[in-house]
Amino acid sequence: MSHTNLIDVDSVLDAAADIITNDGYASVTVASIASRAGLSEADVQSVFPTANDALVAMLNREFQGMYGNIVENIERDPRGGLLSRMYTYILASVYERPLAKALFVIDRDALNSIMRNSHSFAYTPNVGIRSELIERLQMVGMVRTDVDAHIVSSVLSSCSAGLALTAPHDDLDSIIDGLATLLSRGVDADVDDTSPGKAVFYEWATSLTLPKGAA
């Protein structure tokens, strides 16, 4: 067994995440990752030649984990196939995960920097509700047909951006509940069975977390 195989990759990614969350993007180097993980620089470089390679892998793991949690919450929720419920779980996933909050709310420049330095990023770092998802939900009867998907997507993006700009919030749960209530009243279709919407979201989320070129 090679020395590389003995390195705990997750411990390296955990160290990078801890530095991003607590010290900021500028503090992430091979040396700082190695120190935080209790490894030598050579150990870290045996699995990630540069600090940005580690950050890209860290972001991939975080994004995949976020959507895994969102899908689980939607699946458990009897009304989970409705747009209002999806938006609730997406926002909660960002604000409840320290690394996600650091990258998507506190320091989006760090997220952009990681992306700019990567030429083979496999996942799409976007936690917003895109118009194509809303259109698919309309097709299966989860969103009202008289709703303009592009307008709803733009409004939700503005709400999410506003939450990020005005964070932190002492009443975040109330804000998210209020936004979800507005969506429920103005956008959700009146249906009993939301399983078609759950299937649409699962397919959409899976497409975001598959490596490029994967079937």
Image (cartoon, rainbow, N blue to C red):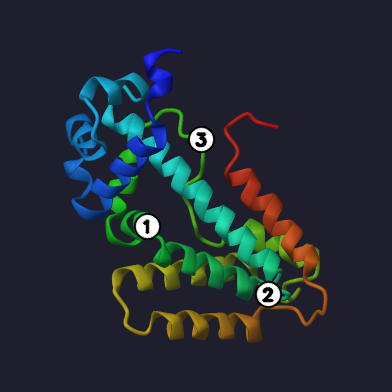
| Image x and y of residue 24, in percent | 21, 50
Q: Residue at x 39, y 40 (%)?
A: 58
What amino acid type should be assigned to the residue bearing mark 3? Ala
Circle nearer the N terminus (1, 3): 1
What amino acid type should be assigned to the residue bearing mark 1? Phe
- Foreground tag (1 vs 2): 1
Q: Quadrant of residue 197?
A: bottom right
Q: Is residue 99 above or below residue 207?
A: below
Q: Which residue is mark 1?
A: 104
Q: Secondary structure at mark 3?
A: loop
Q: Which residue is mark 3?
A: 122
89 relative position to 16: left or right: right
- Foreground tag (2 vs 3): 3
Give the CA distance from mark 2 to mark 3: 32 Å
Q: Residue at x 18, y 51 (%)?
A: 23
140 relative position to 94: left or right: right
Q: Is residue 132 above or below residue 77?
A: above
Q: Which residue is mark 2?
A: 147
Q: Residue at x 56, y 62 (%)?
A: 129
| Image x and y of residue 76, in percent | 68, 68
Q: Secondary structure at mark 2?
A: loop
Circle nearer the N terminus (2, 3): 3
Look at the image and tell me whether residue 127 can be seen.
Answer: yes
Look at the image and tell me whether residue 115 can be seen.
Answer: no
Q: Secondary structure at mark 1?
A: helix
| Image x and y of residue 108, in percent | 31, 54
